[in-house]
Each structure stands twice: as C-alpha cells, then as structure tokens.
Amino acid sequence: MRFFSDNAAAAHPKVIEAIVASNRVDTAYDGDEYSQRLDGAFSELFETKVRAFWVSTGTAANCLALAALCPPYRGILCHRHAHIEVDEAGAPEFFSGGARLILLDGPGAKVTPDAVTEACDGIRNDVHQVQPAALSITNATEYGLVYRADEVAALGQLAKQRGLALHMDGARFANALATTGDSPADVTWRAGVQAMSFGFIKNGGLNAEALILFDTDLADEIAVRRKRAGHLVSKGRMLAAQILALLEGGLWLDNARAANAAAQLLANAAPNRLVYPVEANEVFLKVTADESAGLIAQGFDFYDWGPGEIRLVTSWDQRAEDVERLAAALAAL
Amino acid sequence: MRFFSDNAAAAHPKVIEAIVASNRVDTAYDGDEYSQRLDGAFSELFETKVRAFWVSTGTAANCLALAALCPPYRGILCHRHAHIEVDEAGAPEFFSGGARLILLDGPGAKVTPDAVTEACDGIRNDVHQVQPAALSITNATEYGLVYRADEVAALGQLAKQRGLALHMDGARFANALATTGDSPADVTWRAGVQAMSFGFIKNGGLNAEALILFDTDLADEIAVRRKRAGHLVSKGRMLAAQILALLEGGLWLDNARAANAAAQLLANAAPNRLVYPVEANEVFLKVTADESAGLIAQGFDFYDWGPGEIRLVTSWDQRAEDVERLAAALAAL
Amino acid sequence: MRFFSDNAAAAHPKVIEAIVASNRVDTAYDGDEYSQRLDGAFSELFETKVRAFWVSTGTAANCLALAALCPPYRGILCHRHAHIEVDEAGAPEFFSGGARLILLDGPGAKVTPDAVTEACDGIRNDVHQVQPAALSITNATEYGLVYRADEVAALGQLAKQRGLALHMDGARFANALATTGDSPADVTWRAGVQAMSFGFIKNGGLNAEALILFDTDLADEIAVRRKRAGHLVSKGRMLAAQILALLEGGLWLDNARAANAAAQLLANAAPNRLVYPVEANEVFLKVTADESAGLIAQGFDFYDWGPGEIRLVTSWDQRAEDVERLAAALAAL
Amino acid sequence: MRFFSDNAAAAHPKVIEAIVASNRVDTAYDGDEYSQRLDGAFSELFETKVRAFWVSTGTAANCLALAALCPPYRGILCHRHAHIEVDEAGAPEFFSGGARLILLDGPGAKVTPDAVTEACDGIRNDVHQVQPAALSITNATEYGLVYRADEVAALGQLAKQRGLALHMDGARFANALATTGDSPADVTWRAGVQAMSFGFIKNGGLNAEALILFDTDLADEIAVRRKRAGHLVSKGRMLAAQILALLEGGLWLDNARAANAAAQLLANAAPNRLVYPVEANEVFLKVTADESAGLIAQGFDFYDWGPGEIRLVTSWDQRAEDVERLAAALAAL
C-alpha cells in the first residue's frame, strides 16, 4: 500500500481519454487547438488575462519562470526546504545561468515576511554580495502547510517594497486551494505573484504541468526558453489535452479534495503524533523505529523522514480500504 | 493532406496501449520496471552494453549528450544545416554552458571527412581560438540523406585522430536503417559513435526519445544532467513503455519502412525534380511558385523551402490514398 | 624589429608615471578619486553623459557589454573575422551565458547594412531559431579598415529598425579616429551605439581598457557583472590613472597618429602589394614565401597571415629607424 | 589612519620597479620571459612541479580553479563566511556554470572535518540533490585564523575519502605562513590541496595574483578558461614581474610578517576585547558604539562589523606610528 509519494500515482482515466482523443495528426508543438485553448482556460480560472505554457515537469515549470524573473547575477530567496533547493538538482542555477538560492528558515517550510526581511537586511547593498531579485514560495509547502491569500499578499507587498519578483511553486496548488477555498486569483496575482507552476502530474495528470504567467510580458521570453531547454514537445496537444481534462468540471479540485481527505483521515488517527498540522495531502508523524518497522511489516510503504519521523503522502487515487487500514494501524500504535 | 512534418503524426496505437498498460501506481522517475528494462533492450539491439535514458524531446536527447561530450569552453563541429544549429534555439549552448557550434558545409547537410579536416586545420591551436571537442552528425540528415556504416566509420576514425568525440543525432535513425539495412551496431559504436539520440516521436511515439550512451562512463553525469534540466519526468514508466512497444517486434523499423516507402512513391512520381536523392522519408522538390500554389489548392500541406523548392515529409501513418493522390499530382505537374 | 602586434608594445612613460603617482593608500576597488573621475572625463570627450568602467582586457570590456546587450537565448551579429569570434576563446558565450555569434561576411572584416539585412532575413521568426538581439562592429576592423560616422549611423538606423542593440569593439578606436577625424560622439552614440570597449592597452596603456556605456541604464548591471567576472581589481585607481593620463592632452590620439603614420610609411613603400587599404595601424601585404623569409632574415618580426600574405602592425612606440628600414626592405622586394 | 583593508594598501616599491623594468616590447600574453619563469619559481617554493598562472584578482584565481575542480552540476563545500560566498558576487556560479556553494558553519570561518562530514551525510546520494565535488578552505580565514599543516591534512584526507577536490583560497596565504612557519608544501599539496589562489595584491602587489595548480593536468583547461574569462592580459610580463619581485628574497614573507606584527601589537593592546585569536593580520574587537565613534573621531578608519564589533586589518605598509597610536587608543578604551 503506497503512501510514499503522489508522484507515483496513476494518471486519471479522463486524462488518458484526453490523450487518446487528441492523438491524431495535427499541427506540431503548440499550434494545435488544445494548446491554443490553454490561455483562455487559465484566464477564466484566474479571472484575468494570463499566459499558460505546458511543460513536462514541475522542475521545468519552476525554473523557466525563475530564469525569467531573476538575472544570472542575482539571487532567489526561498525556504531552506523548498523543492527548488533540495530536490531539483541545481536546476534553478542551470536555467537561470547561475543565480543563487538564498535560503530562509521557518517551520514547516513556510516563508514569513520576517524571514524575508531579515535575509534582505543581512545583505550589504553593494556589488560584492549577491543581491536578491526574486522570492519563491511553495503552496502547499514541502511539509504540507498552505498559504492563505492574506499571507501571500503580505509577502507580495513586501516583495514589491524590496524590488523582488514573486514566484509560486504550485506543485500542490490544487491541494492548497482545496483546503483554503481561496479563489485562484486571490492567492496568486491579486496577492502579487508574477509567475507560478501549476501542478497537475501529482494530481491525476500524466506528464503535463502548467507554467502560468500573470506578468504576460514574460511570455515571449518563456516561449524561447522552453524550446531552448528541450521542453517544447512536438505533440504538445496531448499535454494540453490532459490539462484541459483536469480543469474541466473542476476535476483538479475533486482530485485534490480526495487526496486531502485521505490525509485528514490519517491525521485524525494519530493526532498526537503530528509534526505539522495537516493542511494538504502530506502527513508527517513522530514514530519510533520500531513502530515504523511495524507499519512496514503490515505492508505500508512510506518515506522515513529522519530519526523518529515518517512522511505519508496521499493522492487522488488512494484506495479507501488502504487509507482505512493505515488509519487503523496508526491508531493502534 | 499533411506532408509538412513527421513531427505532427499521431502516436501508434500500440504506443497508446503501452501508456494505458503502464498507467498504474509504481515507483516514480525511472525506478519502475519499464524504465529498468531499457538498458537491456537497447544493449540487445546494439549488440553491446549501452546505457539508455528516456527524455521527452530530441533536443533534450541531443543536447544532454553534447553537454557531456564537450566542455563549455570548446566547440562542436556540425553541419551548417544540422538541427542542433538551425532548429534547437541555442539548446546546445544552453545545455553545454556556452560551447560553440562550428559549422561545416556540404551538400544535403551531410558531413564529409574533408569538411572536418578543413575546419580543424583552419583553427589555430592556441587559447585564443575555440578548439573543437566533438563532431555531431545527423542520420538521416535534415535533407533526408543517410550515412552508411563505412561513412560513419571514416568520420569516426578521423574524429579519433583529431581528439573529437562523435555524436549522432538519430531523430530519423529508424528511417536511415530502414534504407541501408545496416545493423544498428555497425553504424554507431562500431563506427566510433559515443552517444546518440534515437528518435521515436517522429516514428510512432508520443513523447519519448532515447538517449543512448555507448560510452557508458557518461551515464552518471547524464542522469544528473537530465534531472537538472527538468527532464526526469515522474511517471517515466509511460515513456519507457512507449519505447519498449516500438522496439518490440521491430515496430520501429516497420514504421520507418512505411514512411520511407511513401517518400519513394513521391520521389518516383517526379524524379527530375528531386533536389537530393530520397534516402529516407523526406522529399525536396524543385517546383515553381505556381506549381506549389496548385498543390496547395489541391489540399496538400507542406513546407515552402525557399524559392523554387518545397519539402515533403512522410510518416508512418501517412494514408495510402493521400500519398497516391500527391504522387499523381506531382506527376501531373 | 617587432611588427607582429601592438599588443606587445610598451606602456607609455606617462602611463607609468600615473601608476607611480596613484600608488598610495586609498579606497579599494573604484571608490578612489581617479576612478571617480572617469565618468566625467569620458562624458566630456563624448559630449554626453556616459558611464565608464575600467577593466583589464578588451575581451572583458567587449563581453561584459555584450552580456548586458544580449540575453542568453539570443544572438549577436558580427563579422566572421571579428575579434569576438576569432580571438576571444568563446568569451562572448561565457559572459552572456550562451548567446550565439551569428556570422556576417564582407571584405576587410567590415560589416555592411546589406550583410545585416541578409542575415536577419534568413532567420525565421519563431522559437526554433536563435533570434539576433545585438550587432557588434569593430572600429578599426581586424583588417585595419575604419568606419566613418555615416557608415556607423547607417548600421545604427538599421539596428534600431531590426530591434538590435549596437556594440562597438573599439580596441583600436583611437587609430580609427586619428584617421577619420570624426568626433568620438559622431561615430558612437550619435550613430546609435549603446556600448563600446575603448582600447588603451594597444595604444600606450599597461592594463586598462574602458567600457563605455552610452545607455547609462546598463551601469548597475555592468558594475555587478564586472565584479562577478573577477574584473573589479582592488587597486583600480592605478587603472583609472592610466586612462586619465592617456586622455589628458590627447595623448591617446597622438599615440594613435604615430602608429598610423608608421603604417602609412610601410604602405607607401609597397602600394601594389596591399591586400586592404591602410586606414589605421595594420598593413596586410601580398608577399611570396621567399620574400617573407627574406624579411625575417633581415630581422623583421611579423605574422604570417596565410599563404602569400603577411600582417604588419605598428604601434605608438615603433622606432623610426625600424620603420624606415622595413619600408626600404619592402620597396626593395 | 587606514585600518579598514589590506586591499587598499600601496604596491611595494620593488613591485613598481619590476613593472618599470619589464615595460618594454616583448611577446604578448604569457610568452615573455617573466611569465615563463613563474612555473619554475613556484615549483621551487613548493618543492614539487606546479603550474602557475597570473591573474588580476583573487576572485579570478579562486573561481577559475573552482570551475576546473567542480562540474556545473555539482557543489562546492565552503564556510558560510568564505570570501567566495560572501564577497565574490556569485563568481563561483558564473565561472563554474552554475555549481552550488554548500555552506558550512564553524567559528572564525574555519572549516572542520566534522562540519564537512555532517554536510556530506546530510545529502541524499541521488540525482535530485546537488552532490558536492569540491571543498574550498581559506587560509588565513576571513576572520584571521590560520590552518596548520596537520589541520589541512585532516581535511585533505577526508576530502579524498569523500571524493572531493580540495581548493585553498590563499588571498592571505603569506600571512598564514608567516604565523605558522609551515612550509608552503606541507600546508598545500602534501596535505591534499589540488589548486590554490596565492595572494600578492594585499601583500605588496599591484594587480597580480597567482593561481597555482598542484594537479598539473588541469593546466591546459585553466589556460583556456583564463582567456575565455578575459583574464589573459596582453602585457602579462608586468604581472609576472610583480610576482617574481615579491617572491625574490622572500619579500612576500617579510611583508606578511610586518602586517602580522602590526596586528599583534593591536591585539596585545586590547586582549580582553578579542573576538577571535589574532593569527594573521586581522583583529576583530568587541567595542561599544561609543567607543567605536571615539576611535573614528581620533582619525582611525576601520570597518564596523555588526553591533558591538569592529574589524581592523593591517598591511605591509602600515606606518609604525599609526599602529602605535591605535594600540594606545585601544588600550585607553
């Protein structure tokens, strides 16, 4: 029973259907009708004119955006546990041409205005030190915490004051919104976000993430950078079709709600063991090595998260009986 | 009736089946059983131990390999009309960190030993001039010519003498082999090729190309570079499954033969108009602007290739009646 | 008797004096009074507000400017024989993060509007091909030809139409102006140049070139890029002092006139052998291998410039008797 | 009275003499006799065959070496307060093509084996996390502490076990050796160092630092990288001459001893205020804001080093009466 990553989930049947349906001769790259509908679909969702680009991975979506937001000779503020720092193999440096990640602390991988202020104030404003040009936040965070619209707005206002672009890593954006009920607009461009990755792959997609530009002036540059990075796939219609299928009828939110509900069920089974509040689809628990071994012995598969801690991640396709069985096992510890 | 690019073809039904079949919970990235079978499948095909990596585009496959073969401060010899020069948006420079493409001339986008020798001899061996470190050839070339095994071997020998790594862009490798009947081994590693991109997308795949390393020492570096470039997709099993489906039973060669046969049919319809011999699935024809307009009026879709010239590309899924109709139209010009 | 490069000349006594005079405890980097005077001195010379930065080499001056004028994912048009292409070891690619040099043809390494137009027209305006963002010209050219103000203005106008920034490599800018008598302003910013390298090292300096920004908005970026490239020397006052010494009283023009006059003397001695008109301090001559050997045997030191051709370069400190002796030897061939 | 930086010191008279003496027509770049003597001079000093390159700044010397020791897709371990992290404007990322600095803690900016071990152990060995390839230490450190030979050897041994190259930033190497009396060989290559920057500019030079390669296989690459970074100055003889003048008769050690002695005098005047032991030419003192203001009012110039702390740096040319006056002022606080 797999609880180690939503990355490992299957693609949703409707996504597969969409791939099959779009599998016909058509214009290559993004000239097809599916790709051409993306801008409109996301503009509607975000209640403003945006530009949307499919790419094959969240790393590409994040780092293409960061490269457009931060010149090679400046820095990107992010949390010490942000995905772009710990799990993208230096892709931010690669895509940006050598920009530096400047690391912030804070519980649950969440960035606070104070942490941003402290970091900026600690940098001498001269040519010897790397000056920050962007701030990147992750919603939901690597530890499953979410930012509410007002929290993002506070960071957005600070970013503006400090001359920083604001980027959101939205690999689990759906899970965040499913929890907060915030409107996509409120938690992004209205709060000052200029560009974001909008994750679909962990949430029922096969290989399509969206890079959303609220600052649409960046679109031409992103289009070239995407090609230059080998991310302009020739049958882009099948990526666009996946995204459209997930957007349609709110399937992306339904999937996220399902994953979140499973996580809540697990959290409720072991409330005293929680390392962080469970606000999305990740559950971090304090368990002893023996307890962990016991769970493994019962067939549960999850990440050991350092001494005395485990990580459980739920996804849209989690089987109810697996979740119930794990909840029971946790309660019985 | 589409003759403008094999890039725009559909994915083969067996490829779609393979995607569906592999769409289940599994290890993320390339830890799954499909991905784990790639090395073996290609090692068998090439009759030697190789390392094989799926990526989503030919540009990624080419440029990851080139980055491993050429340091940032050196150059890559290639034909002036090579895809890496004219159609990858500077991806070789991006992936390599600034290596320079050094351009060779020659008919039909084909590289000759003489052209390589002349280029190398024209570069002063000092720190002021960019020294070449690699040679990249394309088989079949951008103009549909193929390299026979002995031609590659001659280039391979020269490359070795000159201290150059040898790379092959095999976006249409299947079409080349379908014509020559050469063994995959003879035209690659036995001839001195260290790394190649092996194209599947133009040939029935959806979004999976293979990067093949004959120099297996490069594998660890390529694995990191792939991740760092945002090309380690999380559901890699569905890319691997596509490739395996095309390899199985020689479907990749069948598809290429079908495309090549269609091209031959067109070539035979207008033998006096051929700009280059037709050796793969591309047909370049001399036609007047009026003639071209006439073909368009009849519903044929193709690329204008500069004054007085058009490009026709056939693919595995070309409908027989379309090909016959175009052949008739060409014959009737 | 050295005629192989003005690079190998000595520093002018007044330059040495200036170094000695500025050799005292002072603010590090460019906070000293000498460095602080550079903007003013060049603004006066160019009759407009400019920003001026010392660097240690022409390569640094050129490539820092180019990096600010061209993003990593675009290209720089330049002559096939431009120094940035043939003698800077890929520095443009390094500083810019992978921008591509797009090569133009033309006699004497001189760029014409037609060559620029042809190159631009040959590039499809899509994301697959590298789009040019800048044009770089060299005045005087690598073959000793000069651009008059109206020639630069024609290129400047075209560049503007095409959306290209205009850069001038002025390693021998002094030699060009000494010949044309053009005002520094007319041949640069009034003609559309945004940034240039202004050479002093070949013209009496020790290790100080100037990077001049007519587009002063680039100054902050250049300041950071200079530091980041290891070109912010700590005792910058000694570089600034050199430049000021050469500017003072027009020593830079006197030195250039001396070098040019020596070149004219040589040119006049062998007018029928000239490969190019001699407009600066370089003389390219057609001589046979035997003749070349004869000159070498007489103690003259120069570059063999391919079969049947030699290059003679004169500098500010060329001894009159050496020049006369070489002129006589050439006349006697 | 300047105590804010040894960077701001004058060049030594013998250095100026050497520049004047080498100011004559000669081979350009590093073909001259002075440059040609560098390898020999440093090989003698280090009692082994080394390759030595002049460059104009410590940043260039450090980052050229790091680029050769660490591929773009890996990381460089260094102290959080290392110069390459805090004062080189991202030059390590620029020269290396995007390698990441991985930061270590420890008092006095000194790296301990434990800190290295902890950092390495905290990095998962997979393609998602940036794997370290090099360790860089600074001797003397940014806070004026020195590494003894056995300390470097312990780090060298650990580096070898962990597959890390070992780099030394020796901007104040002379000051370190002047204190420890260690032989240059013992504290470098015998202890496992592969490449180092050897500082002269803070110690009497004008604009020449040395990049020393103990791993001489890197020499060809460094030669190209130096040119490509715009650091191959054309009159390199004047850089080589400076270095030779400082090496001759041990002037470099005499200068360092003078600077260190001045620092000791200051340290002894306020032993209870020392933040770190004074082992080179830097003195960090705890003083109140009022005390600091009092010192400034007496004409002493130094860096405020955060709340309650000041930094005093002495150099070879520090006037004895200034040092005595400051010592008295400190004692009188």
Image (tube, coloured by chain):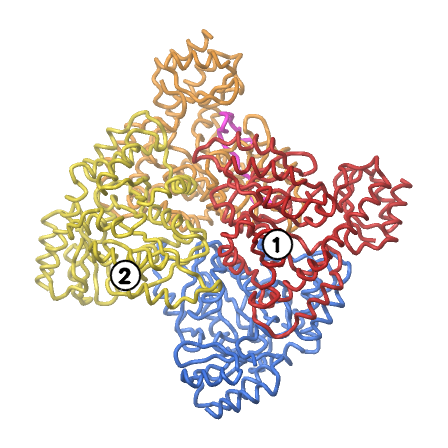
Chain colours: A yellow, B orange, C red, D blue
Horizontal and vertical percent position of residue C231 = 57, 60
Which residue is more in the foreground, D267 or C263? C263
Q: Secondary structure at mark 2?
A: loop
Pointer 2 and pointer 1 on the same chain: no
Which residue is more in the foreground, C182 or D234? C182
Horizontal and vertical percent position of residue C250 = 72, 56
Q: Which residue is mark 2?
A: A111
Q: Residue at x 76, y 54 (%)?
A: C254
Find the magenta span and give its range. B131-151
Q: Chain of mark 2?
A: A
Horizontal and vertical percent position of residue D232 = 64, 57
Residue D184 tag number: none
Which residue is more in the foreground, C315 or D166? C315
Asked if B144 appears above or below D59 in the picture, the reply is above
Amino acid type, callout 2? Val
Tell which tag, 2 or 1, sits nearer the viewer.
2
Residue D227 tag number: 1
Asked if B291 appears above or below A243 in the picture, the reply is above
Q: Residue at x 72, y 45 (%)?
A: C181
Quadrant of the drawing holding the C terminus of chain A:
bottom left
Tell me if mark 2 has few (under 14), some (14-19) or many (20+) residues whose alpha carbon lies within 10 angstroms of its own.
many
Number of numbered discs on residues: 2
Could you say which quadrant of the image residue C134 lies in? Answer: top right
Relative horizontal placement of residue A265, taking residue D198 as reference (left or right) = left
Q: Is residue A189 magenta?
A: no
Could you say which quadrant of the image residue A164 lies in? Answer: bottom left
